[in-house]
Structures are given as structure tokens and as C-alpha cells.
Amino acid sequence: MQLFRPNLEASLTGAGYMEQMVQGILVVNTETIPGMMITETLGVVSGSTVRAKNLGRDITQGLRNIMGGELVKYTELLEESRQEAIGRMVAEAMSRGATAIVNVRFATSAVTAGAAELFAYGTAVKAE
């Protein structure tokens, strides 16, 4: 199962376990990294993006919503948002000298009518 863009070396190795390599930084959603030891904790890192709806996309997806099925354009928008938020989180981790980010989570919030924030956060660590 591909969790993120194909160029990000992502894998799903167990139920609910997410692991991916982004710009040389290992990103996992667990508190530990199987087979590795965390040698230093560097603090919380985060990345976010705010995206607004698109009129053309809204019209086509509104029709799709009436007929049923996946709202593909919104799925693509969310994927782009996740990638941007992860990239910003990884950049912050790299600036701290991290080799991995553990316990990664995602959150969303409405900023204004028609715009939402996607927020990624985790703990930057050095792992061997």
C-alpha cells in the first residue's frame, strides 16, 4: 500500500505503522524505531499548510458528491497538503541535526470559510 508519493520510499510494514524516508530523514508514526536506538531527543518539529477551495474543483466535486463516489480532486488536494506539511516538518528537523522524526501525527482545522490548515508534527531525534 502506497501511503505517500512514490518518490518518497514509503512502506507499510504492519497494521497502523507508517515509515518513510524524506530527504534522508526517517519519518515514523511510532515512539520508537524498530531496530534502531534513539540517542538524542531534539524537540518537537512541525510543518503546516493552509489550502483554499477552488471554484472549478468545487463544482465538479459537488456533482460527484451528489452521484456518489470518491471526491478525487479533494483527495489530491489533501495529498499535496500532506506532502507540503511533511516537507516543512522535515526541513525543521534537518536544521536541528536530526536523523529521524518519531511519533508523527497530523491534524486539521478550519481557518476560514473555504480554507483549511493541515498540520504535521512529531519529535526530532538522532537515531542509530
Image: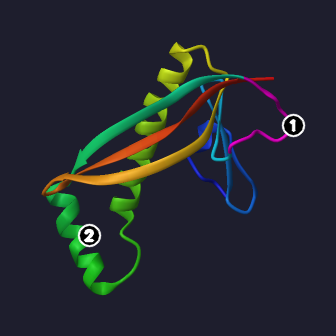
- In this picture, is 23 found above or below 17? above
- In this picture, is 84 found above or below 116? above
Q: Nearer the viewer, residue 102 or 88?
A: 102
Query: What amino acid is found at the position of numbered circle 2 in the picture?
Result: Gln
Q: Quadrant of the N terminus?
A: bottom right
Which colour scheme appears in the figure? rainbow
The residue at the point 17 percent across, 68 percent down is 59
The residue at the point 74 percent across, 40 percent down is 32
Residue 82 shown left or right of residue 30 in the figure: left
Q: Quadrant of residue 37?
A: top right
Residue 68 image point, x, y percent? 35, 84
The residue at the point 22 percent across, 74 percent down is 62
Residue 57 image point, x, y percent? 23, 60
Q: Quadrant of residue 46?
A: top left
- In this picture, is 92 found above or below 122? above
Residue 91 shown left or right of residue 66 in the figure: right
| Mark 1 residue crowding within 10 angstroms, few (<14) / some (14–19) / many (20+) | few
The residue where tag 1 is placed is 35
How would you classify the magenta stretch by its main secondary structure?
loop
Q: Is residue 35 magenta?
A: yes
- In this picture, is 110 found above or below 24? below
Query: What amino acid is found at the position of numbered circle 1 in the picture?
Result: Gly
Residue 23 shown left or right of residue 128 in the figure: left
Look at the numbered disc 1 and give the secondary structure of its residue.
loop
The residue where tag 2 is placed is 61
Label placed on residue 26? none
Bounds of the magenta segment: 31-39
| Mark 2 residue crowding within 10 angstroms, few (<14) / some (14–19) / many (20+) | some
Look at the numbered disc 2 and give the secondary structure of its residue.
helix
Q: Quadrant of the C terminus?
A: top right
